[in-house]
Amino acid sequence: MDLDILIQILGATLRVATPVLLACLAGLYSERSGIIDIGLDGKMLIAAFASAATAAIVGNVWVALLAAVAASSALGLIHGFASISLRGNQLISGAAINMLALGTAFLLSQTMFGTGGQTPGLSADQRLLGIQLPFHSELGTFYQQVISGHSVIVYLTLLLVPLTWLILYRTRYGLRLRAVGEAPNAVDTAGISVSRLRYSAALIAGVLCGVAGAYLATAQAAGYTDGMTANRGFIALAALIFAKWRPYPALGACLLFGFVEAAGYQLHGNLRFESRELATVVEFLESSLPYILTVVILAGFVGRATPPAAGGIPYAKER
């Protein structure tokens, strides 16, 4: 492989992996607290729509980011209410959130803009564009394309990995959060509110999914399109299982997905077909291959993964 092409793929890897990593960390907080969250994709989707619609109307990308976080957090709290207060089935609640987000985003986009499930295209000042780090021009191609030139969300997401490790393993809150995912009875006996900890985890997951959705609509793309998350929330869940609910292995799994998808984009750009039917088939295979390969690789190397013991089990306080 040509070195320039490899550098382009590595640069694209960071951009593609960012929303998946954010969703994976969101799932990490949620599932460490004992709440299974298969609604990551739906929360990213509603956040992507909220950010794109707000940016198109207000014209300020930071307000759009706040709107995305608010929309996603609202769905996160709904999932928390169904899972914690109502002690409902968490899988059904997560699936309902995915369907609710997809339908709501389409309905609102059609009502507000009449564009059939899309928002208007965003201009440069309505988007989160890449920033050039110091010495961007002086250093070589690798620094310019792989290290520098990404959106600020990419850098903040990478910083979130050690921060999450620090919170989970070096703070009292993290110790309690992990404990409530393993033995909520013991946490309750110590006089700590299980519900409060789980709600906080649901809220953190909502915030992270909100940032991921805003990144998709205002940094990676220039607007919202129907179903634009392309099941990245489920890839994030697969990465979370591969990582065995730990931050640094989650980073590796998400970068693996990003690399495979970025390589697929590069392959797609270099192939030419005279037959339209053949091109359609190859395009379909190219678009689905990153997901298939990622899941196969993750499934092949995951080994024995033991989830938090209280994951998916509603907690009822004993009286």
Image (cartoon, rainbow, N blue to C red):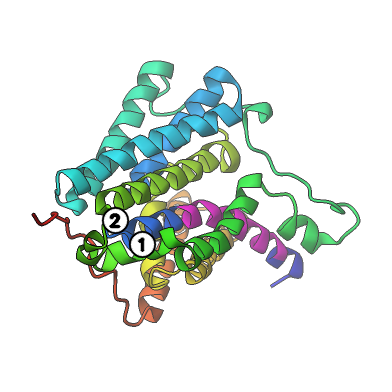
Q: Amino acid at mark 1?
A: Arg
Magenta residues span 7-22
Relative image position of residue 45 (x, y in whole percent): 40, 40
The quarter of the image holding the N terminus is: bottom right
Residues under labels 2 and 1: Cα distance? 8 Å
For mark 2, does the 10 Å Cα neighbourhood hold few (<14), some (14 to 19), or many (20 or more) residues?
Answer: some
Magenta stretch: dominant secondary structure: helix
Give the residue pinned by disc 2: 192
Q: Quadrant of residue 143?
A: bottom right
Circle 1: element type: helix
User: Which residue is rendered at x = 60% and y = 21% of the image?
Assistant: 59
User: Which residue is rendered at x = 87% and y = 60% of the image?
Assistant: 139
Question: Can residue 59 be spotted in the picture?
Answer: yes
Q: Amino acid at mark 2?
A: Ile
In this rendering, the count of numbered labels is: 2
User: Is residue 45 within the magenta segment?
Assistant: no
Q: In the current view of this chain or complex, which residue is farthest to the front?
A: 191
Q: Nearer the viewer, residue 245 or 259?
A: 245
User: Is residue 10 within the magenta segment?
Assistant: yes
Give the residue pinned by disc 1: 176
Q: Earlier in the sequence, mark 2 or mark 1?
A: 1
